[in-house]
Amino acid sequence: MEMTFEVMKAIIDAYPYEVVFVDRAHIVQWMNKTAAKRYTGRVTIGASLFNCHNERAKVKIEEFLRRADAGEGEMFQVLNGKTGEREFFVPVRNEEGEVIGYFERHEAPWDEEHADEPVGDYWLRRKHPEV
């Protein structure tokens, strides 16, 4: 099988956590199905990531980029007190090792009662608990 863009997209779409790839200029270039479901109306392909992040987050992201440029890989950001998620900054590099963009990796809190629930459904339930 040839590894085409379609195959790679299908692999990332199958990943149960959201992936929002952002370039060096902080423009959202792509997101997988889980991210599209979670961030509907808040994150838009072709728009600045900072449309949905405040100034404090912008400073943190710029610092993570500096650290990535210095050679660091995935970096822990925060334990989100509101959602219970651990959040990580993940630099994406080209073949020469240069950082070409990044994404934020979230780990949803594990809930024994809903352990077999897909992550995308988990976020819909959190957004709309009445459903």
Image (cartoon, rainbow, N blue to C red):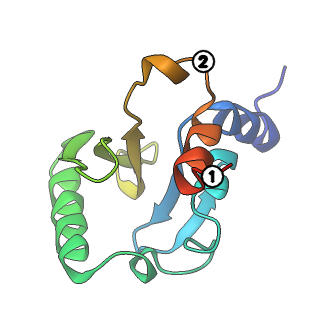
Q: Nearer the viewer, mark 1 or mark 2?
A: 1
Q: Quadrant of the N terminus?
A: top right
Of residues 108 and 73, the one nearer the viewer is: 108
- The tally of labels here is 2
Disc 1 marks a residue whose amino acid type is: Glu
Q: Which mark is residue 25?
A: none
Q: Residue at x 52, y 18 (%)?
A: 115
Disc 2 marks a residue whose amino acid type is: Asp
Provide residue 37's location: percent of width, then percent of height.
66, 54
For the residue labelled by badge 1, is the local secondary structure a helix, a strand or a loop? loop
Residue 19 vs residue 14: left or right? left
Provide residue 73's location: percent of width, then percent of height.
25, 39
**How far apart in space, not on screen, are marks 1 and 2 (Cα)?**
20 Å
Provide residue 86's location: percent of width, then percent of height.
28, 40
Of residues 13 and 9, the one nearer the viewer is: 13
Q: Quadrant of residue 87?
A: top left
Q: Residue at x 61, y 26 (%)?
A: 117
Q: Dot 1 corresponds to which residue?
A: 130
For the residue labelled by badge 2, is the local secondary structure a helix, a strand or a loop? loop
Of residues 109 and 69, the one nearer the viewer is: 109
Q: Residues within 10 Å of mark 1 (few under 14, many from 20)?
A: few
The image shows residue 56, relative to residue 111, as above or below, that is below
The image shows residue 1, relative to residue 12, as above or below, that is above
Q: Residues within 10 Å of mark 2 (few under 14, many from 20)?
A: few
Q: Dot 2 corresponds to which residue?
A: 116
Q: Residue furthest right?
A: 1
Circle 1/circle 2 CB separation < 8 Å: no
Provide residue 110's location: percent of width, then percent of height.
40, 25
Q: Residue at x 39, y 69 (%)?
A: 24
The image shows residue 43, relative to residue 13, as above or below, that is below
Q: Residue at x 68, y 48 (%)?
A: 131
